[in-house]
Image: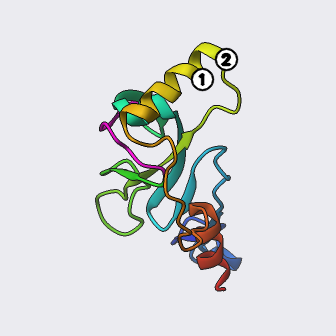
Amino acid sequence: GTRIKLTGQGEVGPAGGPAGDVYLEVREKQHETLVRRGDDLHGTLEVPMTAAALGTVLEIDTLDGPHEVDLRPGTQPGHVETLRGLGVGHLHGSGRGDLHVHVEVAVPTAVDDEQAELLRQLAALRGEERPEARLAAANPGVFAKLREKLSGR
């Protein structure tokens, strides 16, 4: 936590001496959806695959209330949208950190026959009936990376 000293705000000293100091220990409560890293905040926004492909404007809750996030068409999983000045206020000085919104694309786990046929048609239009399979380097999630940095591993 952060310790704040209030000089001369404590009890009066012995025999009428000067007042002592008061020390306040400030601890922050963990937020249910945001993770703090310095003055910046990080959160994950899950969007349907159709919204990621077509683009959309979504309203999210920030510490300052609702705020719109504009996702461009073709938004990829892992994309980070940075909202300037919506993080935590700087402890010494003016200004605030940023809010980093990490996009997670939700792929449906079940589709009905009509949806499956539409997806097959889209795959055919895109020439993706039999896509090439390539392994890529493992990419741990953003919160795993944050945990590693915070724990010093």
Task: Name above or below for residue 102 compared with residue 144.
Answer: above
Instruction: Answer left or right for 103 relative to 54.
Output: right
Work out whether residue 7 or residue 99 is closer to the camera in this orientation and state it.
99
Inter-mark Cα distance, 1 to 2: 6 Å
Give 145 or 112, whichever is nearer the viewer: 112
The residue sitting at 67% across, 17% down in the picture is 112
| Residue with the most extreme bottom position | 153
Left or right: residue 80 compared with residue 61: left
- Identify the residue under disc 1: 116
Name the residue beneath numbered marker 2. Answer: 112
* Magenta stretch holds residue 72: yes
Residue 23 makes an appearance in the image? no
Residue 153, compared with residue 12, is above or below; it is: below
Where, quadrant-wise, is the C terminus in this rendering? bottom right
Q: Which residue is drawn at 60% across and 23% down?
A: 116
Q: Which residue is drawn at 54% across and 47% down?
A: 44
Q: Residue at x 39, y 35 (%)?
A: 53
Q: Is mark 1 on a helix, strand or loop?
A: helix
How dense is the environment of label 2, judged by Cα within 10 Å: few (below 14), some, or many (20 and up)?
few
**As shown in the figure, which amino acid type bears the numbered disc 1?**
Ala
**In the image: residue 113, left or right of residue 104:** right
- Is residue 94 magenta-colored? no
State which quadrant residue 69 falls in: top left
Residue 78 percent across, percent down from the top left = 48, 55
Range of residues picked out in magenta: 66-77
Q: In this view, does 142 lie above or below 54?
A: below
The kind of secondary structure element at disc 2 is: loop
Which quadrant, please, contains the N terminus?
A: bottom right
- Percent across and percent down for residue 138 are 59, 71
The image quarter containing residue 46 is top right
Camera sees residue 63: yes
Proximity of marks 1 and 2: CB atoms separated by less than 8 Å = yes
